[in-house]
Structures are given as structure tokens and as C-alpha cells.
Amino acid sequence: MGSRAQMYKYEFDRVRDDKWRLQIWMCETYAPLLKEYLPEIEFDFKEGLKGACTTILSITKEEEQKVRKLLDVFKNHVLLKKSENIEPYFEDELDVCYALDYNLAEDFITKEVGYTKCGSVEHKAKENQDADARTQLVETLANFCEIHPLYKKARTIMPIPPNPSKTFHLPVELSRELAEKTGKRDGTGMIRKVRETPKLQALPLAEKLKALRGAIEITGDVEGKSVILIDDLYQSGSTMWTVARLLKKKGARRVLGLACVKSWRDTDNIND
């Protein structure tokens, strides 16, 4: 699937009262996830053409809704994996990671690049400190956490931490408000930067990782816990994966990344 995936299509139709036909594309990526996240449902997929596969499900109305909502998560949000750029530096520190959407998209007709709807909202929430935009992001993040089984079970929400001198940091605000909305534990006070780091987006990847080394401290108890790690922008993922490594070293059972937007490219100025 490369470093990102998004299910562009599925078909889910009733064939009899309690029988449903499900066809998905990108089967190699998403069939195992359906089986993992909904183990109570028997998915017996038969492979077809062009990466599609089909199964017939005997399910209740409640189970049908669970399947449909999870399919919509796969279709509407971006599943993120390690890019080839950070692959040599990390292992399995981050159990799973999603972004609500990309920050930019190319117009199909004009070929012009502009903000996606989510990208525009994230930009307003971050650059303008727009409270309404932040509320929109929290609503979407909360809906995601309610539907996705792993995120629903997680009890702690924690942000990528800011520099000590920073007075406004969107991931902190989102984590705090998301914890309040979902009833999960607010972990904003459980993580901090112990020293200033330079503007990381401007650094080549190797220098970025060097700057992060020893700069972040986990101060709360995460032993045996599943932690949702919040960031506003996922670029190469190096910061998210670095913090996930620290959480795993502190005994976290699972680390689930969740970003507002994914940048259009994976690279962090690698050749600059």
C-alpha cells in the first residue's frame, strides 16, 4: 500500500433479509483490517480482479451498521504507514495511524493545487487560532474515535508537545477538547519538551531526528495503556514515530496516531 492508503470505493448491498454482499477494493490492505477490527463477523473474502474481493455476510442490522461505518472510515480518511524515508529509523512503535484528510489536493480539471475542506479548516485553526475551526476538527476527530474500534477502546489522549516558549499549540488544544468531548483521559500534562528545538519542518530528516533526540519527556503513567497521539500535520511522520517510541519504552500497550491532515508529500527536505 506504500506509505498511505484510502479506500476509494466499496459496494455493500442486501441480497436477502439477513444476507449482504460486500465488495471492497484495495483488498490486500483493508480485508485484514475488517477481520481484525470486527472479529465477531465472519469475512470470507474471495479475490477478484484489480485488487477487489467479495464476501457474503450473514449479519444483523446492528452489525451491518458497524461494517458500513468502518468502511466509511476507510473511504473518508487516510491510513498512514512508514514512508521509505523513515523506514530505516523505526520499527513498530506506532501501531496504526490515520489522518482525517490531505491538506492539499489537485483540481481534476484545472490542475491547480489548493486546500481540501479539512486542510482549510486545519489552516484556520492553526494559523488564525480560529475557535470555530478548532471545534469542527474536534467534532470530526471525536466521530472517528467513536467509530474506529481501536481508538474507541483507547482511554488516553496525548498531543505532540510544543516548544516550551510556545503559547499556542493546536495539538494541545485539540487533545484537551477531544478528551473532554469523548470522556477519555486528558494526557496534555503527561508529555513535554524539555528544551527548545529548531523549526523541524525546515530541517533535513536526519537533522530533525537528531534535534528530537532527548528533547521530549513522558511524565505520566502510560504502562499498559492505549494512547491516542494527536498532531495537526503529518508530513514524513518522524515526530509522531519518535514520540510513539518514547511511549512504548514507557510501557504503552498501543500507540494510535491521529493527525488532522497529511501533507501532499512524505519528504522532510531530505536533500536540502
Image (cartoon, helix red, strand yellow):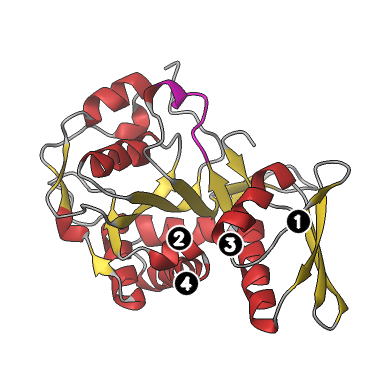
- Residue 6 in view: no
The residue shown at (51%, 64%) is 148
* Residues drawn in magenta: 81-88
* Disc 1 + disc 2, Cβ < 8 Å: no
Which residue occupies 46% across, 47% down?
Answer: 96
Disc on the earlier residue, 1 or 2: 1
**Quadrant assignment for the C terminus:** top left
Badge 1 or badge 3: first in the primary sequence: 3
Q: Which is nearer the N-term, disc 3 or disc 4?
A: 3
Find numbered disc 2 in the image and state the secondary structure of the residue it sits on: helix
Marks 3 and 2 sit apart, C-alpha to C-alpha, by: 12 Å
Q: Badge 2 is on which residue?
A: 150
Residue count near mark 4 (Cα–Cα under 10 Å), binned few <14, some 14–19, many ≥20: some
Crowd tier of the residue under label 3, counting other residues whose Cα lies within 10 Å: few below 14, some 14–19, many 20 or above = few
Residue closest to the far top = 271
**Disc 4: which residue:** 146
Which residue lies at the image location 45% right of the left edge and 38% below the top edge? 235
User: Which residue type does callout 4 highlight?
Assistant: Glu
Which numbered mark, 1 or 4, is in the foreground of this view? 1
Which residue type does callout 2 highlight? Leu
Q: In terms of image quadrants, where is residue 158?
A: bottom left
Q: Which kind of residue does numbered mark 3 sit on?
A: Pro
Which numbered circle lies on residue 44?
1
